Image (cartoon, rainbow, N blue to C red):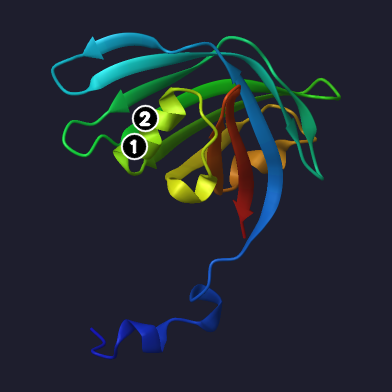
């Protein structure tokens, strides 16, 4: 086994994360259904009623019927997200999109978001890791990529910029 420092053996191509924008996504959501404090977490379910996505290589709408199974962790109050939605491109292809995410920040900021107030995206952390499934030959390249999303909670719902990791 090599005893050299790992930084010395990593190729330069592995020392920086490269990405490019894939699309922006806005979700329309109903007020969350509060299941309440279960044995492990405070559980909420957000019903996604629609939305839209726009990017250089694909665009379209979010079909109704998706959901966001949210858990608010005891102790630090961070929210974990578990989302499943179906995207429909402008040319009719269907794409399943799932993502896990995390939202946290100062409690005062999270309270302002909960009240529907405008909050700067720099005042808290909202990130996700989307994955895609499609049978469409035209968009099959989505099946083979890792993406990361930077999010922000607007009054009408969350908005994300999704980046393809190169």
In this picture, residue 134 sits left or right of residue 80: right
Q: Position of residue 56 (x, y in %)?
A: 82, 45
Numbered disc 2: secondary structure: helix
Name the image quarter holding the N terminus: bottom left
Residue at 50% x, 74% y is 14
Residue at the spot of label 2? 111
Numbered disc 1: secondary structure: helix
Residue at 44% x, 22% y is 115
Q: Quadrant of residue 34?
A: top left
In this picture, residue 55 sits left or right of residue 121: right
Residue at 32% x, 43% y is 106
Residue 12 in the image: above or below residue 166: below
Q: Nearer the viewer, residue 25 or 7?
A: 25
Residue 92 in the image: above or below residue 129: above
Residue at the spot of label 1? 108
Count of numbered circles in the view? 2
Q: Residues within 10 Å of mark 2 (few under 14, many from 20)?
A: few
In this picture, residue 46 sits left or right of residue 151: left
Q: Quadrant of residue 71?
A: top left
Q: Position of residue 161 (x, y in %)?
A: 63, 44
On residue 146, the disc is none
Q: Are marks 1 and 2 in contact (CB under 8 Å)?
A: yes
Residue 124 in the image: above or below residue 166: above
Residue at 29% x, 87% y is 5
In this picture, residue 139 sits left or right of residue 29: right
Marks 1/2: CA–CA distance: 5 Å
């Amino acid at each position: 086994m090599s005893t050299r420092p790992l930084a010395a053996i990593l190729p330069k191509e592995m020392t920086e994360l490269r990405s490019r924008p894939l699309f922006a996504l806005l979700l329309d959501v109903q007020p969350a259904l509060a299941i309440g404090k279960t044995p492990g977490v405070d559980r909420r379910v957000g019903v996604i009623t629609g939305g839209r996505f726009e990017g250089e290589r694909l665009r379209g709408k979010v079909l109704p019927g998706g959901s966001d199974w949210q858990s608010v962790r005891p102790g630090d109050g961070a929210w974990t997200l578990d989302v499943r939605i179906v995207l429909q491109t402008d040319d009719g292809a269907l794409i399943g999109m799932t993502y896990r995410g995390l939202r946290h920040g100062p409690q005062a900021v999270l309270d302002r978001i909960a009240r529907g107030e405008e909050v700067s995206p720099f005042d808290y952390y909202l990130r996700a890791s989307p994955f895609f499934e499609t049978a469409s030959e035209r968009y099959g390249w989505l099946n083979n990529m890792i993406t990361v999303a930077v999010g922000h909670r607007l009054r009408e719902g969350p908005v994300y910029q999704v980046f393809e990791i190169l």
